[in-house]
Image (spheres, rainbow, N blue to C red):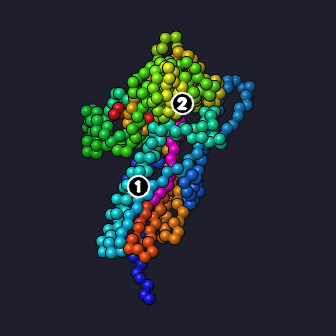
Amino acid sequence: MAVPNNILQTVQTYQKAELAWLLNSFCGIKLANKKFQKFNDLTANLGDIVTFDLPPRYIGYNGLVITQQQSQQRVQPLVCSQATNVSSGYTDQQFIFNVRDYMDRFGEAAMKELGSIIEQDIWKNIVTGVVINDPQNSNFGSAQTNSGPYRFYGDGVTQINSFGQLAQAVANFEDFGCAKNKMRGVLPVTVVPGIVNTGLQQFVMNRNEKMAMSWELGRFANTDWYESNLLPIHVSGTLGQAGTTLTLVSVDSTGTQLTFSGAGTDANALKIGDMGQFQDGVSGQPNMRFLHFIGHSVSAQPVQFVVTANAASSAGTVVMTIQPPLISAAGPNQNINNALAAGMQVKLLPSHRAGVLYSGDQFYLAMPQLPDQSPFTTVNTMDKDSGASIRHYFGSQFGQNNRAYVRDSIWGSTMVMDNAMRLVFPL
């Protein structure tokens, strides 16, 4: 019996082209740090974990009399917890006469869908406020770390629509302390025209001419700016939506659980990802400021935080779980200028669309190779430069005129909270 022609040998070529399309068409996937030693080039599956180092922290003491302090390695885990696939099926006749020469177009459409799902998921790091439990990890003296920012710029009411506001966001970001390399900002695509328009109104002919031609922000304030139509919306709890002023009653020893009054009674008082700020000008209370992340001197930045657990309020009281831990005791993990005290006030942001400002390649995305789908023919293609990979497998049902093609991927992502800031845009 004659051996039939192998019409499937070009699948690996298709897949390589599809992978390139994925990497070049979604700014989050493209920009994320995907370089993990010996991880993305290994075969992995859901639940596999990789960890990466965070900068150690110390505190300086005056004089020459030494005070030995603990050296503590800080790491953050990244779990491959997400998966998605796009599959399609054809009869032999459809494939031979209609599909074979059109596979590149089908592949592009499949990767648009696959990429959109991955892109939307990884940008959720901006708003989830998810706490990663890891007994091996220590961050701000806690056995938990947060994925996503705890600082923000914008109030959720006033639109961010000018270069001046972007410059102020960058200045606030740098004042607290951040990695100075690879500063990147990602904005909702719908706000870019308004920002560009403010720049066009400035009488600087050469720059404005370029801006008018490109209608893009490009590089500004030492930051590369990008746009996306897949950035997340955060739906705040009722306390944020109402703009309620909360009054601090007490704080636990870790600085992560704060009890407030003035909260009414509501099952949806707080939502994971809500963001708040301590208010200035409260009678009898000092203004709360963050310390610089390195150096521990007082910055100009108000104390902000992200809520990491849903909570109901009852009889006017609500218990708020937050990151980062707010620590006033002297030491490497001190991050606020005054001890928290009863009577201090806090307000939360209303619902908003979230952009992000981050630096230092601190937005991580793992996309390891998946195992072979034996007995089906499987092709795993990994981009050697970035570490991103997709699996493409195919096969036929025995005795059935059904030929199936599947493209799938697993991934995990995290954003180091100390090197990120949420940009808050009104809905």
Please state the extent of the stretch shown in magenta in the rendering: 408-421
The residue closer to the viewer here, 136 or 395, is 395
Q: Is residue 233 at all visible to an observer of this figure?
A: yes
Residue at position x 60%, y 33% in the image:
140
In terms of image quadrants, where is residue 170? top left
Residue at position x 53%, y 15% in the image:
343
Q: Which quarter of the rendering shows the C terminus?
A: top left
In the picture, measured across the screen, residue 152 lies left or right of residue 74, that is left
Q: Which quarter of the rendering shows the N terminus?
A: bottom left
Q: Is residue 419 magenta?
A: yes
Residue type indicated by callout 1: Leu
Please identify the residue farthest to the bottom as the structure is shown. Answer: 1
In terms of image quadrants, where is residue 404? bottom left
Q: Earlier in the sequence, mark 2 or mark 1?
A: 1
The residue closer to the viewer here, 58 or 28, is 28
Residue marked by disc 1: 114
In the picture, measured across the screen, residue 110 lies left or right of residue 136, that is left
Residue at position x 42%, y 78% in the image:
6
Q: Which mark is on residue 322?
A: 2
Q: Is residue 169 at all visible to an observer of this figure?
A: no
Locate residue 279, reporting x and y percent.
47, 20
* In the rendered image, the vertical position of residue 318 relative to residue 79, given as above or below: above
Q: Main secondary structure of the magenta part?
A: strand
The residue closer to the viewer here, 408 or 262, is 262
Q: Is residue 220 magenta?
A: no
